[in-house]
Amino acid sequence: MPVSKRDFYEVLGVARDAADKDIRAAYRKLARRYHPDVCDEPDAHERFQEIGEAYAVLSDAERRAHYDRFGHVGPGGVGFDMPTDIFDLFQSVVGGFGFGHERVASGSDLEHPLPISLEDVATGFSTEIAVGRFAHCEACGGEGAEPGSSREQCTTCRGLGRVRYRQSAMLLTFTQEAECPDCSGTGVRILNPCKACRGAGRARVTERVQVQVPPGVQDGQRIRYHGGGDAGPLGARAGDLYVAIRVRPHEVFVRRGSDLVCEVEVAFPQAALGDIIEVPGILKPHELTIPHGTQHGDALIVRGGGLPELRRPERRGDLHVLIRVAVPRRLNKAQRKALEQLAHAMDLDVRPQDSGLRSKISEVLGG
């Protein structure tokens, strides 16, 4: 089901009989507020798009008349032909924030891997990392021009950073758009480049970043630091820094969500008779009751012996203990006699191998 559009007058916050100048003023105010380069709200781009569409219709007398009569669907049952580039519309009406910043690409996002242990997952912790990134040049404040000098709008692209040119083929004419060759897409010309950054507006630095790792974090999760990535060229906003969690494999435990799994060996008498043993835990040992008659491969559970949940760290998963019944490879005389008596008591017709004969057979077979 298509999403219904809001009323264009409501989008711009003007009355239905608003004058052209009032519509233009409302657009300028809202477009500056919700421009993605200055607004950090998650729906900024959608709002900016909506504002641009509303202005494109209401600022045109013919389109506005059709809209007042038919609404969002035109007289032929077809929607309005909207502008292909809402940023070009913004540039033509508002003029930008200062020579084309909105057309300069933001800085790149960065990812920094952070290896941690399973014990770190259980507790959470704070650490400091060193991040190499491009930061705005301190000498010129990211402008790229020598302090005291100014920048000029590129006359070729009129500050848009893009140029359009026509190309003919056969009987058809195509209009294509490309990066401005004179300003490299920045929309500005720097007559006196900053000596510190050579006109780039940014410089390479190494910064210390404090990272807070929450308990229960998952392997592969990324912690985002807004604006912690590379600064954009010529004062454009910085990208984001993502700290990627890498949980190292544990020698004892396997993780299953917030649960942990481990294996524990018990002797045959413990499995048969039952026992209370100590099993390893991620932060401290746990006491585990082995019921009598426990079988090899049975899983016993220590409630709350797992990891904290990420969203609700007061809740913890369980520890699943897989029982491995150990069979002794060698027996002394007393142990052998006891097992023979047990076999007799269980009415088992056991024919024990002679250990000496078994050794000779192993030698012949290469064991």
Image (cartoon, rainbow, N blue to C red):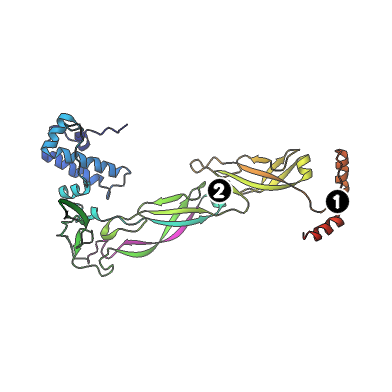
Camera-side mark, 1 or 2: 1
Residue plotted at (44% across, 50% down): 222
Q: Position of residue 96 (x, y in %)?
A: 19, 52
State how far apart marks 1 and 2 are (Cα). Answer: 49 Å
- What's the mark number on residue 353? 1
Looking at the image, residue 74 sits to the left or right of residue 276; the answer is left
Dot 2 corresponds to which residue?
122
Residue type indicated by callout 1: Gln
Residue toward you, 73 or 115 = 73
- Relative to 361, residue 351 above or below: above
Looking at the image, residue 335 sits to the left or right of residue 7; the answer is right
Residue plotted at (18% across, 33% down): 74
- Relative to 129, residue 28 above or below: above
- What's the mark number on residue 118? none
Residue plotted at (46% across, 58% down): 128
Numbered disc 1: secondary structure:
loop
| Image quadrant where one finds the N terminus | top left
Badge 2, how many Cα within 10 Å: few under 14, some, many 20+? many
Q: Position of residue 324 (x, y in %)?
A: 71, 46
Magenta region: 125-145
Which quadrant of the view contains residue 161?
bottom left
Among numbered discs 1 and 2, the one appearing first in the sequence: 2
User: Does the magenta portion include 283?
Assistant: no
Looking at the image, residue 58 sits to the left or right of residue 142; the answer is left
